């Protein structure tokens, strides 16, 4: 009897999860980590419960976050909710950008019936020199939006002021 109740509960949770089709991806930049939830919608972007314009004060940060959607011409097709922690403003914007780009690729490759929007735009162009159409992954890779920036702050060394700055040399 208890086993039947557990199976019913599991099937109910599965139905709830498949009811809304969304993708969850992570993006990283410097020490910032972003979790990005993407689903079909009207183009709303919220970061840590605030709108994009309120969370990122600088226009360059907002432009950086919207970049993957603008490259794919999908700025008003998906609602994006991101939670970011760590790092500074620029690092957080870069982390959200990588998360959105990965979410677009994942959404396209999962084969959602709604993903035809992405596939139609990406499949309309043909790669030069080949007969294969450009996919979402190829377009975002060409725009260098799927590569994680490996640059991080170098650690401070023992006996130095900073990572590379040392004490003043005294000859005598």
Image (cartoon, grey):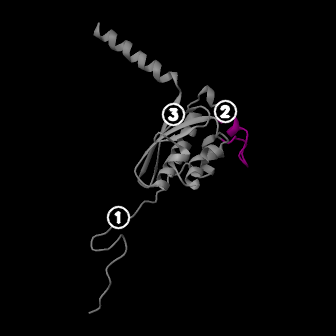
- Disc 2: which residue: 117
Image location (x, y in percent) of residue 171: 29, 91
Q: Quadrant of the N terminus?
A: top left
Residue at 62 percent across and 31 percent down: it is 115
For disc 3, the neighbor class at 10 Å (few under 14, some 14 to 19, many from 20) is some
Which percent across, then down, holds residue 99?
A: 51, 44
> Which residue is at a point 70% across and 34% down the rendered structure image?
120
Instruction: Give the number of the disc on residue 23.
Output: 3
**Residue in the foreground of this view, choosing between 157 and 55:** 55
Front-most of 154 and 48?
Answer: 48
Q: Residues under labels 3 and 1: Cα distance?
A: 35 Å
Indicate the secondary structure of the residue bearing disc 3. strand
152 sits to left or right of 23: left
Q: Is mark 2 on a helix, strand or loop?
A: helix
Work out whether mark 3 precedes mark 1 in sequence or the reverse, and give the earlier one: 3
Report the front residue among 11 and 33: 33
The disc at residue 155 is 1
Q: How far apart are marks 1 and 2 (CA)?
A: 45 Å
In the rendered image, residue 53, in percent from the top left (x then y), is placed at 56, 47
Q: Residue furthest front?
A: 54
Q: Using the image, tell me which numbered label, if any, was put on residue 77.
A: none
Q: In this view, does 90 lie above or below 168?
A: above
Q: Evaluate if marks 1 and 2 touch, with contact meaning CB atoms under 8 Å apart.
A: no
Q: Residue at x 31, y 80 (%)?
A: 167
Magenta span: 116-134
- Camera-side residue of 161 and 2: 161
């Amino acid at each position: 009897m208890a086993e039947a109740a557990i199976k019913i509960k599991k099937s109910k949770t599965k139905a709830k999860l498949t009811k809304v089709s969304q993708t969850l991806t992570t993006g990283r930049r410097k020490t910032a980590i972003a979790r990005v939830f993407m689903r079909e919608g009207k183009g709303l972007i919220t970061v840590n419960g605030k709108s994009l314009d309120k969370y990122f004060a600088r226009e360059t940060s907002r432009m950086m976050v919207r970049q993957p959607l603008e490259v794919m011409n999908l700025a008003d097709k998906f609602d994006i909710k991101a939670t970011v922690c760590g790092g500074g403003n620029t690092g957080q914007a870069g982390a959200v950008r990588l998360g959105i780009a990965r979410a677009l690729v994942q959404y396209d490759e999962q084969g959602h019936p709604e993903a035809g929007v992405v596939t139609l735009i990406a499949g309309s162009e043909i790669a030069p020199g080949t007969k294969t159409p450009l996919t979402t992954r190829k377009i975002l890779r060409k725009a260098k939006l799927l590569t994680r920036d490996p640059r991080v702050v170098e650690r401070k060394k023992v006996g130095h002021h900073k990572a590379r700055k040392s004490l003043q040399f005294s000859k005598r």
